[in-house]
Amino acid sequence: MSDTQAAASEPVWTFRGYHLKASDFTTAMVHLYRGEMQRSNVWRQRLDNTTNWAVITTGAALSFAFSSATNPHGIIPLNTLLITLFLLIEARRYRYYELFTARIRLMETDFFAAMLVPPFSPAADWAESLAENLLHPHFTISIWEALGRRFRRNYMAIYLILATAWLFKVILHPTLATSLNEFIDHATIGAIPGWVVLMVGFGFNGVLFLIGLLTIGLHQASGEILPRFEAPQAVGHIFGRLLARGSAAKGRPSAGQAWYRPSGRRAQLLTIVITEHGEEVGRAILRELQRGVTRLPGIGMYTGQPRDVLLVAATLTEVAHLKATVGQVDKAAFVIVSPAQEVLGRGFQPLQQESAAAPV
C-alpha cells in the first residue's frame, strides 16, 4: 500500500464540525503540550527568582546586624516584613504556575498515559475539562493553599533563621542579658517598647506558622509530587477545607477521586431557543452537537404568531457552537443562555447515582 493510499484509508476524527485525521489530532496535542510545558517552566523560574531574593536579602540583613558594633537588631524585623512580601508575591506566582501545570497533568494522565496502555481510552470528561480550562482560565488552587505550600517548602526555614538570629542578637548585644527585664529592654526599637516588639513578633510569626499548619490538608496543587488520592481526615485537612470555602478550591474532588481531576460538577447551562423553524433548528442541534433537544409550543405575545421553544442543556465549551448552529438555520431566532444549578441525566451527571446517594 502506498503512502497516499495509507493516508486516504486513515480514519477521520469528526467532532463539532471538524474533520481531523488521528495524526493531525495527535500533532496538535503534542504542540499544545510543548507550549504549556514552556509556559509552566517560565513561571517555575519566576518562583525560583522570588526565593532567591528572600535568601539574598536575609543573608545581607543578618551580615549587617551581626557585623555592626552598635545594636541594629531592628533590621531583622524589617527584613521579616520584606520576606513576607516575597512570600505573597511567590504565592501569587505559584497560582499562575499551577494554572498551566494542571493542563499539563490532564494531558499526561489522560492522553499520553492512556496511549501507552491499549486500548486507548481516556477519561470521559478529560477533553471537556481541558477545553473549559483553555476557554475560561481560572486558578486551580486557592490563595491559602499557595501561601501554605510555599511557606512550608521554602519560607519556614527562612523565618526560623530570622527568629533565631534576632533572639541571639537581643540576648548578646549590647551586653549579655542576664534577666527577663534586661532582655525586654534590649528588644526595644526606638520609641517602641520591648514588650510590644515581642508581642507583635510572636503574633506575626504565630499566624504564619498557623497558616502553614492548617493548609496541610489542601491538595488541589498538581505541580508537586503529592499523593494521587486524598488522605484520610486529619486536623490540617479539616481546617483546610474550611479555608478553601468560597475560593478556587471549592470544587475539590471527593474522597477517592484523583487529586489532579477537577470536580465533575463543571459549570452547566440551560439554553432556550425561540424560533419559527423549530424542526430545522432542533435537527441541526442534534446533528452538530449530539445534544438532546426538547421542543415546546409557544405564542409570541406581541405578534400573536406561534413559535417553537427549544430547551437544550449544554456546557460552557458548547455554547459558541450551539449559537453558530442556530444562526445558520434561523438568523432571526431568539437565544437565551442561563446558568443551571445542576444537570442530571445522559451526557451529564448520572441520575441514578444521585438518587442512590439521597437519604431515604
Image (cartoon, grey):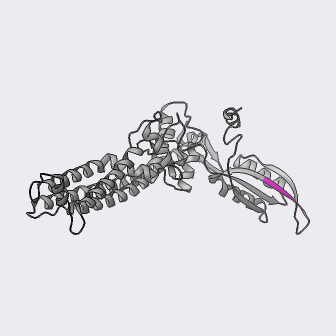
Where residue 119 appears, as percent x and y from the top left, is 55, 30
What residue sits 14% from the left and 62% below the top? 64
Which residue is situated farthest in the top direction here?
A: 118
Q: Camera-side residue: 338 or 128?
A: 338
What's drawn in magenta, residue-wise? 306-310
Q: Is residue 308 magenta?
A: yes
Q: Count the marks: how many?
A: 0
Q: Is residue 223 visible?
A: no
Which quadrant of the figure has residue 47?
A: bottom left
Which percent across, then down, holds residue 339?
Answer: 68, 55
Q: Is residue 332 left or right of residue 237?
A: right
Q: Residue furthest right?
A: 304
Residue placed most toward the observer, 97 or 134: 97
Question: Which quarter of the image is occupied by the C terminus?
Answer: top right
Residue, x 62% and y 53% (percent of image)? 317
Instruction: Using the rendered view, name the quadrant where residue 77 is placed.
Output: bottom left
Relative to 35, does residue 5 appear above or below in the rendering? above
Instruction: In this rendered view, identify the residue nearer to me: 289 or 249.
Output: 249
Task: Give coordinates of residue 318: x percent, y percent.
Answer: 65, 53
- Is 68 above or below relative to 127? below
User: Is there any visible trace of residue 355 in the rendered image?
Assistant: yes
Locate residue 357, reporting x and y percent.
Answer: 66, 34
Q: Quadrant of the N terminus?
A: top right
Dominant secondary-structure state across the stretch colored magenta: strand
Residue 249 falls left or right of residue 169: right
Let me know if residue 66 is in the magenta part. Answer: no
